[in-house]
Amino acid sequence: MTKFKALVVSETADKEYFSEILERSVDDLPPGEVLIRVRFSSLNYKDALSASGNRGVTRRYPHTPGIDAAGEVVGSDSDRFKPGDEVLCCCYDLGMNKPGGFGQYIRVPAAWVMACPGGLSLKEAMMYGTGGFTAALSVEKLIAHGLKPEDGKVLVTGATGGVGSLSVAILAASGFRVVAASGKSDQADFLQSLGASEVVGREAVTDKKGMALLKTKWAGVIDTVGGEILATALKSVKYGGVVTCCGNVASPELPTTVYPFILRGVSLVGIEAAQCEMAIRERVWGKLAAQWRLDTIADLVTEISLADLSAQIQLMLAGGHRGRMIVNLDR
Ligand SMILES: NC(=O)c1ccc[n+]([C@@H]2O[C@H](COP(=O)([O-])OP(=O)(O)OC[C@H]3O[C@@H](n4cnc5c(N)ncnc54)[C@H](OP(=O)(O)O)[C@@H]3O)[C@@H](O)[C@H]2O)c1
């Protein structure tokens, strides 16, 4: 009976949540066709919500979060995978209502598993992880809408976050002029090192006057925070411009009018990574492994152990961390 280490979040009688590293048994994992020895995971905002008792993400505790996992197949009942294959499993219900990548083993349906994209190591794949995949999906949507570098500046909000920092880096590497909006005034150098041509504070991209429309500034916007910042982006994007929406760290509310849509032909495009179909995953991960592969990816990544996770989750919930965080399950 194989034993392994996992971060386990439990609930107290007073509905408080605490994490500890416990020994688990492979026999206790849920059924599934593929057993994977996880080598690396990554920390995403959804994991922080799961670890803090958010019932919209995780219904039952004790629970092991971790929506991302990269490792080797140990056992497989699927003819798509064999022991030793290097694979990724990202999202679906992993780490939400099924034990996730913050454990050294996962067992999952074969339909959730994809081969590690050619050229990326397991560790590099987790440097991108769901945050990078979401950034790449967002950039793809802007380009599919017809956005070109010569059209003007592209705004990225929540720019020091996982999705935000990779959006800045991929857009800049693709030739776009990127304006990074961040609440961290001390991180301007970091954002410029990723390729941002300008860094502005959140207040500069938040309309407090409740105007229906504002002077146009952006050819496109990747918004990762929602709320008034997303509403302001819609009012400030130019005629025919496009805004993607993936997150709600600022607010799930969207206080907008119809005017950006009916007077400027603005498009608001939703981004959804969790249930995204496998063909799209393979295409987008293929881009992350090739034309959107970043030479500087390691500069925006911090490697941590399971023991470091609790503190980093608190920092993430407070909006205080920077870039991407990968979890080495063997440290
Ligand atoms: N739709 C999908 O499929 C999908 C996939 C992945 C992620 N997401 C969502 O996308 C969002 C970002 O995810 P992530 O993993 O990149 O999270 P993250 O690493 O925690 O980044 C979020 C960033 O937002 C900014 N921020 C934090 N609190 C804020 C506030 N109150 N008001 C305005 N900005 C604030 C911060 O950046 P600055 O300090 O630089 O402003 C923070 O670093 C989350 O809501 C997540 O759930 C959705």
Image (cartoon, rainbow, N blue to C red):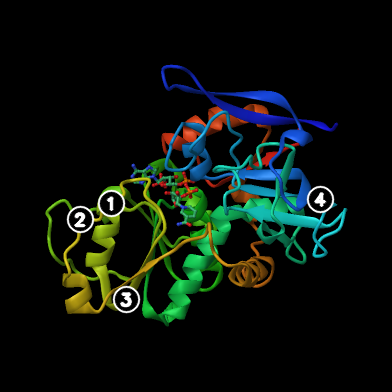
* Mark with earlier residue (4, 1): 4
Instruction: State the residue position of label 3.
Output: 241
Q: Position of residue 5 (x, y in %)?
A: 74, 29
Marks 4/1: CA distance?
A: 40 Å
Q: What type is the residue that disc 3 sits on? A: Gly
Q: What type is the residue that disc 1 sits on? A: Gly
Instruction: State the residue position of label 2.
Output: 255
* Mark with earlier residue (2, 1): 1
- Side (left or right) of 80 relative to 201: right
Q: Residue at x 46, y 38 (%)?
A: 49
Marks 2 and 1: CB-CB under 8 Å? yes
Q: What type is the residue that disc 4 sits on? A: Glu
- Side (left or right) of 49 relative to 254: right
Is the CB of mark 3 within 8 Å of ligand 1?
no
Q: Quarter of the image for the N terminus: give it.
A: top right
Q: Residue at x 37, y 75 (%)?
A: 152
Mark toward the viewer: 4 or 1: 4
Where residue 227 is drawn, which disc sits there? 1
Callout 2 environment at 10 Å: few (<14), some (14 to 19), or many (20+)? few
Is the CB of mark 1 within 8 Å of ligand 1?
yes
Q: Is residue 123 above or below residue 328?
A: below
- Side (left or right) of 50 relative to 283: left
Marks 1/3: CA distance?
A: 19 Å
